[in-house]
Image (cartoon, coloured by chain):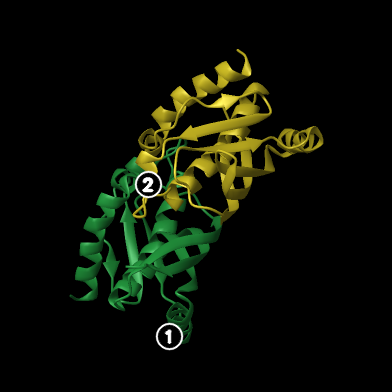
Chain colours: A yellow, B green
Amino acid sequence: MNHQQTAETFQVWLKDQIPLISHMGIGEPVYDGRSLTLRAALAPNVNDKGTGFGGSLATLATLCGWAIVTLYLREQGRDCDVMIRDSQLKYLAPVTGDFTAVTVLPEQAELDLFMSYLEAKGRGRLNLNVEIRQGDTVAMTLAGAYVAVERLS
Amino acid sequence: MNHQQTAETFQVWLKDQIPLISHMGIGEPVYDGRSLTLRAALAPNVNDKGTGFGGSLATLATLCGWAIVTLYLREQGRDCDVMIRDSQLKYLAPVTGDFTAVTVLPEQAELDLFMSYLEAKGRGRLNLNVEIRQGDTVAMTLAGAYVAVERLS
């Protein structure tokens, strides 16, 4: 499978596993092996002011970081549980239309270090930055640490 | 209206305004004028591991802080938009059953300062701590800054 097919298969599985994200109007993920974009419609994610609900933005950004780590590990043939450990969120601008979460994997050296920890200790930690964007505007940033733990099978 | 009645009226309004929270199995809020508790069922909020989805925990905690500021301002007779500005989340333990978000308003001196800014500048900022708990276990903490802006009517 190419990266994009992996992501589409992943999304079908995901919607079955995490019921909340079925209510967020999330479109097809776009993944090229380095970056992941998740798109969401505004309507199911509005707040009392008619703009993007902070909880929805936080959820899409958290999910986007988690998903790219999970996709990367699957492509490396690793069977891991991935969890968010901590995150710092900054809300910069209101969202007034459909929006995307975008993240990019870290440099290869950092990925290699992550994989070597996973190999040696059965767990590793990866720091990621995720942006919520509406067009060219960055509406929120998430800086998060994700932990992967090798699944015992 | 007493505090609890205010909170119940508020929740009816809220579910109408923010569609996503209708999908989270949120129960009646408990509010006594100082602290607010929001309860959520695990089932609509699970992840691929069968535990609480990070996005759901982030959403309930973000909502809880936002709601207590909004409730407090309504009781003070102020018509404001309340928004989250930034937050720091720490995921401490997996959630394996129904869970609550709990927050307490700051000391009176801090509330007075907040209200005096609102009076003088039409906007104020309040820092809050919110915990996600399952029974006695704190599963996540959120430290957030919320901004209130007087609505022009």
Q: Which quarter of the figure has residue B3?
A: bottom left
Q: Residue at x 79, y 32 (%)?
A: A108
Q: Secondary structure at mark 1?
A: helix
Three-letter amino acid code at the position of disc 1: Gln
Quick check: can you spot residue A124? yes
Whether residue B101 sits left or right of residue A94 in the image: it is left
Q: Residue at x 33, y 41 (%)?
A: B44
Whether residue B130 sits left or right of residue B19 in the image: it is right
Whether residue B30 sits left or right of residue B111 in the image: it is left
Q: Which residue is mark 1?
A: B108
Q: Nearer the viewer, residue A131 or B89?
A: A131
Residue A34 against residue B12 in the figure, above or below: above
How many neighbours does mark 1 have within 10 angstroms: few (below 14), some (14-19), or many (20 or more)? few
Residue B87 against residue A74 in the figure, above or below: below
Q: Which residue is mark 2?
A: A46
Q: Residue at x 69, y 35 (%)?
A: A105
Residues flagged by tags 2 and 1 on a common chain: no
Q: Marks 1 and 2: in contact by CB < 8 Å?
A: no
